Amino acid sequence: MSDPTPEIPSPPSPPLPLDPPDGWERFAISAFLFFHLMAIQFWNMPTSYLQSMLTGRIGPYMQYTGLAQNWGMFAPEPGHENFYMEARITYQDKKVRSWPIGRQDTLNNAARLINERERKLVENLYDTNNGRPYYNQMALWMARRHFQEKNNPPVKVELMRFWNPIPVPPDGASLPALTEWHHDTVYSVAIDPKVFQ
């Protein structure tokens, strides 16, 4: 009995040819990247006539992409308060629970990275002039996020601000520990059960 003819392995398939972008696609990608980088550059440059003229035109792009920022943290007057916000949720069984919004000082480093955008949101919500249009949606979002028991839904949400002045220490001294947070309620809304359907 003769040995079967050994199978000859088939040659490997040729690699798929790359499909480089056409000339117009390259131009469109390059133009977008150029615009994007220049928009960031002009948005962050020192105040001047050119900067104020261009930021008026690129403002919508910077706002909608979440790239808008300013130097208010550093000048003309640095922040002089620690602050955060909190949602105080009343459930159907009358129990009240509080959930911090954007509070960084109680988080570890990894959680702070994840929570960074929420903290930036709180910077806008804290100012009642800027934040008021968003309070209702924020309250509904917190109610949905913390709806944990089907038979015990949230019935009321209050948005609260907490702040504490940052003392200016004398040279070489350390800052004292925070001892008291001031607070007020900026928004309160009754929750319709339909929002959970």
Image: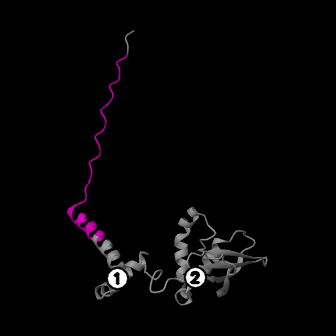
Horizontal and vertical percent for residue 116? 53, 70
Mostly what secondary structure, the magenta segment? loop
Label 1 element class:
loop
Please report whichever mark, 2 or 1, sits nearer to the chain's N-terminal start.
1
Residues rendered magenta in the picture = 4-33
Horizontal and vertical percent for residue 128? 56, 89
Q: Is residue 23 magenta?
A: yes
The disc at residue 77 is none
User: Residue 153: which quarter of the image?
Assistant: bottom right
Give above or below for 21 relative to 32.
above
Label 2 element class:
loop
How many residues crowd around disc 1 within 10 Å: few (fewer than 14), some, or many (20 or more)?
A: few
In the image: residue 83, left or right of residue 37: right
The disc at residue 46 is 1
Horizontal and vertical percent for residue 118? 55, 73
* Residue indicated by mark 2: 168
**Residue 77 seen in the current view:** yes
Three-letter code for the amino acid on which mark 2 is drawn: Val
**Residue 197 seen in the current view:** no
Three-letter code for the amino acid on which mark 1 is drawn: Pro
User: Residue 195: which quarter of the image?
Assistant: bottom right
Q: Residue at x 57, y 82 (%)?
A: 168
Q: Is residue 41 magenta?
A: no
In the image: residue 11, left or right of residue 96: left
Q: Nearer the viewer, residue 111 or 133?
A: 111
Q: Residue at x 33, y 87 (%)?
A: 52
**Between tags 2 and 1, which lies in front?**
2
